[in-house]
Amino acid sequence: MTAGAPAKDDKTPRTARGERTRRALLSAAAEEFGEKGFHDGSISGITRRAGCALGSFYTYFDSKDDIFRALVNDMSGQVRDYVSPRIAQARDGIDAERIGLLSFLEFARAHKEIYRIIDEAEFVDQAAYRAHYENTASRMAARLAKAAARGDVRADVEDVHAWAIMGMNVFLGLRYGVWDDSRPAEQIAAIANALVERGIGRAD
């Protein structure tokens, strides 16, 4: 295929109705895979949950692998779209990390299936799995760099700090978002943020 040429099999919805159908299929896939896992989940189960005909599935996706890959990318985007606007309201760089974790905990509690889906992606689609975490860490590293430029955090923050904070957030989301969501999310975020502040906060 020559550069700039359209995809041979472009399944992008061209109408609002088509986009609604595709969205319904992705939402149904999240339920199906979240409940049954990738291997036991099925296309028929997805279409049944979505209230769509089997033919509608193949209008937008080639296979179970294809919709799973699209779902991982979609859920990663949902997290970004939920968290980013809230972080934009932060007082400073340290507060941004508190709000980031708080927002992620809120999202994980509302979408507990995300952990099973992302974890299975490691074995179903390694590239999508890796992209999810690399993109998240990249956004976090860029945010920390801006905070350092403003003097909100230490000047030597780097990629390692971004991955360390992300790792903490991932496991806090699992423990206090999926396994047990009874403890106030604000409390969890405040405790974790105290660690972040002591770790990368300005020395003064």
Image (cartoon, rainbow, N blue to C red):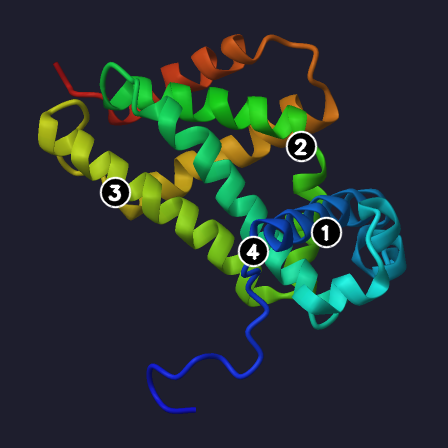
Marks 1 and 3 sit apart, C-alpha to C-alpha, by: 33 Å
Marks 3 and 4 sit apart, C-alpha to C-alpha, by: 35 Å
Question: Mark 1 or mark 3: which is in front?
Answer: 1
The quadrant the C terminus occupies is top left
Closer to the N terminus: mark 2 or mark 4?
A: 4
* Vertical comparison of 188 with 166: above or below: above
Residue type of the residue flagged with mark 1: Leu
Closer to the N terminus: mark 2 or mark 1?
A: 1
Marks 2 and 1 sit apart, C-alpha to C-alpha, by: 16 Å
Q: Which residue is mark 2?
A: 111
Mark 4 residue element: loop
Q: Which residue is mark 1?
A: 25
Closer to the N terminus: mark 3 or mark 2?
A: 2
Closer to the N terminus: mark 4 or mark 1?
A: 4
Q: Quadrant of residue 2?
A: bottom left
Q: Nearer the viewer, residue 106 or 59?
A: 59
Q: Position of residue 174 (x, y in %)?
A: 64, 31
Q: Tell me if 169 is positioned left or right of 39 in this view.
A: left
Q: Quadrant of residue 149?
A: top left
Q: Position of residue 118 (x, y in %)?
A: 64, 49
Q: Nearer the viewer, residue 93 or 25?
A: 25
Residue type of the residue flagged with mark 4: Thr
Residue type of the residue flagged with mark 2: His
Q: Tell me if 4 is positioned left or right of 92 in this view.
A: right
Marks 2 and 4 sit apart, C-alpha to C-alpha, by: 27 Å
Closer to the N terminus: mark 3 or mark 4?
A: 4
Question: Mark 4 or mark 1: which is in front?
Answer: 4
Question: Mark 3 or mark 2: which is in front?
Answer: 2
Mark 2 residue element: loop
Question: Mark 2 or mark 1: which is in front?
Answer: 1
Marks 3 and 2 sit apart, C-alpha to C-alpha, by: 26 Å
CB atoms of marks 2 and 4 within 8 Å: no
